[in-house]
């Protein structure tokens, strides 16, 4: 039952992490993260943190781009670890579980920081380079990826807890036959050891012997009396 629960947690964890990776790849392919609106030209232009742009004089989004690349790489390795663990290609130790927890939580935190920094850069450039901007569904999907990554980390913690409980149950089951064998061996040793020979006679036998001697004493006196009468 515990093993089935652990497998269900692993399957759910892989489901969330796989969708997070799919949404991140979709964000790389789709360019319209935001729509920038200009007053002079009265047109809108799509923008994405993954591509270089000529709107800003200097590329202030270089940090955001590096952070997004790290997020994509870490999410790929996190999904790879979960797949290898689910297919028993790597052992399910506590160190592997700690690595998966760290990757999911760190990746989600890094993605959240990258999105907040991207919003900050958009607000800073609103009054300088464009009049306004409009957020599209891609950024909403990116924020949903943060939720998926944090959920994956929580599921990894639950998996670690269940594995520890499973190990404790196995140790108890493994130790109980040893205890029973020890009890059986101790019982056998008590049965096999012979009792020491009794050198002292029981009191009952001694009493019977004394009584028999007392009964025989009158017979001896009668015999003596007979011998005296015969002598006279």
Image (cartoon, rainbow, N blue to C red):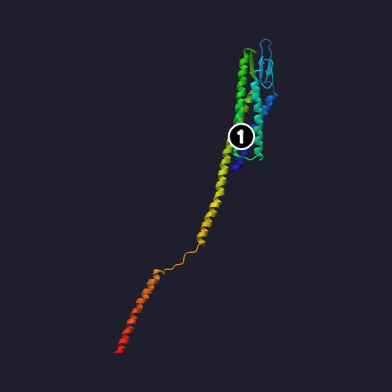
Report x, y in % for residue 22. Answer: 67, 29
Instruction: Residue at 62% x, 35% y: name it.
Output: 13
Q: Is residue 212 left or right of residue 133?
A: left
Report x, y in % for residue 120. Answer: 60, 18
Q: Is residue 72 above or below residue 56?
A: below
Instruction: Residue at 67% x, 34% y: name it.
Output: 80
Q: Is residue 225 visible?
A: yes
Per the image, the residue denoted by label 1 is: 99
Q: Is residue 137 visible?
A: no
Q: Is residue 176 left or right of residue 19?
A: left
User: What is the total number of numbered labels drawn onto the structure image?
Assistant: 1
Could you say which quadrant of the image residue 108 lies in? top right
Could you say which quadrant of the image residue 40 lies in? top right
The quadrant the C terminus occupies is bottom left
Circle 1 sits in a helix, a strand or a loop, which is it? helix
Viewer-side residue, 221 vs 41: 221
Residue most extreme to the left: 232
Viewer-side residue, 48 vs 134: 48
Residue most extreme to the top: 40
Label 1 crowd bin: few (<14), some (14–19), many (20+), radius 10 Å: some
Report x, y in % for residue 224. Answer: 32, 84
Could you say which quadrant of the image residue 204 lies in? bottom left
The quadrant the N terminus occupies is top right
Report x, y in % for residue 147. Answer: 60, 28
């Amino acid at each position: 039952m515990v093993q089935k629960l652990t497998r269900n947690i692993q399957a759910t964890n892989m489901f969330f992490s796989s969708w997070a990776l799919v949404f991140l790849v979709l964000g790389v392919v789709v360019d319209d993260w935001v729509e920038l609106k200009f007053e002079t030209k009265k047109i809108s232009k799509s923008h994405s943190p993954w591509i270089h742009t000529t709107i800003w004089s200097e590329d202030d989004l270089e940090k955001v781009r590096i952070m997004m690349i790290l997020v994509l790489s870490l999410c790929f390795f996190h999904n790879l670890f979960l797949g290898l663990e689910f297919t028993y290609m790597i052992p399910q130790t506590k160190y592997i579980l700690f690595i998966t927890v760290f990757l999911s939580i760190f990746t989600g935190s890094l993605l959240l920081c990258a999105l907040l920094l991207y919003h900050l850069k958009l607000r800073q450039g609103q009054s300088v380079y464009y009049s306004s901007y409009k957020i599209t569904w891609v950024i909403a999907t990116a924020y949903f990826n943060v939720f998926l990554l944090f959920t994956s980390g929580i599921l990894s913690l639950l998996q670690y807890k269940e594995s520890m409980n499973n190990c404790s149950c196995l140790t108890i089951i493994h130790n109980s036959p040893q205890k029973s064998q020890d009890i059986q061996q101790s019982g056998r040793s008590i049965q096999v050891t012979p009792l020491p020979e009794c050198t002292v006679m029981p009191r009952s036998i001694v009493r019977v012997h004394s009584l028999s001697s007392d009964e025989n004493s009158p017979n001896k006196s009668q015999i003596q009396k007979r011998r005296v009468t015969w002598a006279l």
